[in-house]
Image (cartoon, rainbow, N blue to C red):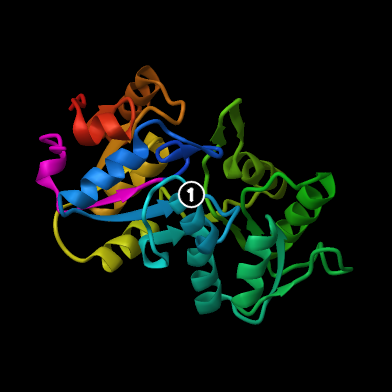
Amino acid sequence: MALSPLLQRYEQVILDLDGCIWVGERPVAGSPEAVAALRSAGLRVAFATNNAWRPAEDVVAALWGHGIQASLGDVVTVGAALQHLLAETRQGRSAFVIGGEVVLRHVSDAGLRVVNGTDAAQEADVVVVAGTDQVDYADLRDASLSAARSGDLLGTARDPTLPMPGGHWPGTGALLAAVETASGVTAQIVGKPEPQLFRTAIDRLGGGPTLAVGDRVDSDIAAARAAGIDGALVLSGGMSAEQAEAASADGGPVPVATAADLRTLVLGDAAA
């Protein structure tokens, strides 16, 4: 299958996962075929995700389960980026964490002492907020009190929602907004729209013209601009064409193309 004229301009592609490759546990129709076509045409492919719910090994297994070939080296997760940042800058400190077991492990492996559930939960040196469906008021309270005292708040992302088959679930940004509002502290963001995930992916892929593909203007396309590469938008994550245009018109980045889904972008006609 021949690639679209747009994709023929690039040597490598970085793909978002949620909303681009899959929605929840369901693959976006045509996404496995699109990735296979990219590889068959000789393009190098990597995956970069703001989702910290599962480790890279599980992401690789999920990709294979949907018929998409991938190795650990192809996957860049925000959890791994968080661990690297914490190990470089905050090793030995105490941390309160909102997030699942994967994030707790990343923080611990970075050399920090996790104080969730202890008497020091409201006095942590560092507060980390990641996406999770296991959070209660006490977590938000302790995170907010610690952040207000230390002033050191990290978020894995600002994505307000997570695309799921039944509609949008509250994302990392929704939880982070509560902690920022209560503490008065603005978080440092580790994942997109910051460029580090894409820069890591580019380092792994090598040089050459690069296209990033994602489903959010304020996250994926903004991260592409920050990383100095082109960004294309797919609407399979729930953002409408009108919402995308409004986001770009309001000072946001403009994608080089917009398509209904990855297959249309890669093999069909995309609106440039």
The verdict on residue 5 being magenta is yes
Residue 14 position within the rendered picture, expressed as x and y whole percent measured from the top left: 30, 51
Q: Which residues are magenta?
A: 1-16
Q: Quadrant of residue 244?
A: top left
Which residue, as the protein is rendered here, is positioned at the far top? 242
The residue nearer to you, when weighing 195 against 103, is: 103
Asked if residue 111 lies left or right of residue 220, the reply is: right
Q: Nearer the viewer, residue 127 or 61?
A: 61
Up the image or down, 82 lies above or below 27; here it is below
* Mark 1, secondary structure of its residue: helix
* Residue at x 55% of width, y 72% of height: 86
Residue to which mark 1 is pinned: 65
Vertical order, 177 against 270 (above or below): below
Magenta stretch contains residue 157 = no
Q: Identify residue type, mark 1.
A: Gly
Left or right: where does residue 8 sit relative to residue 145?
left
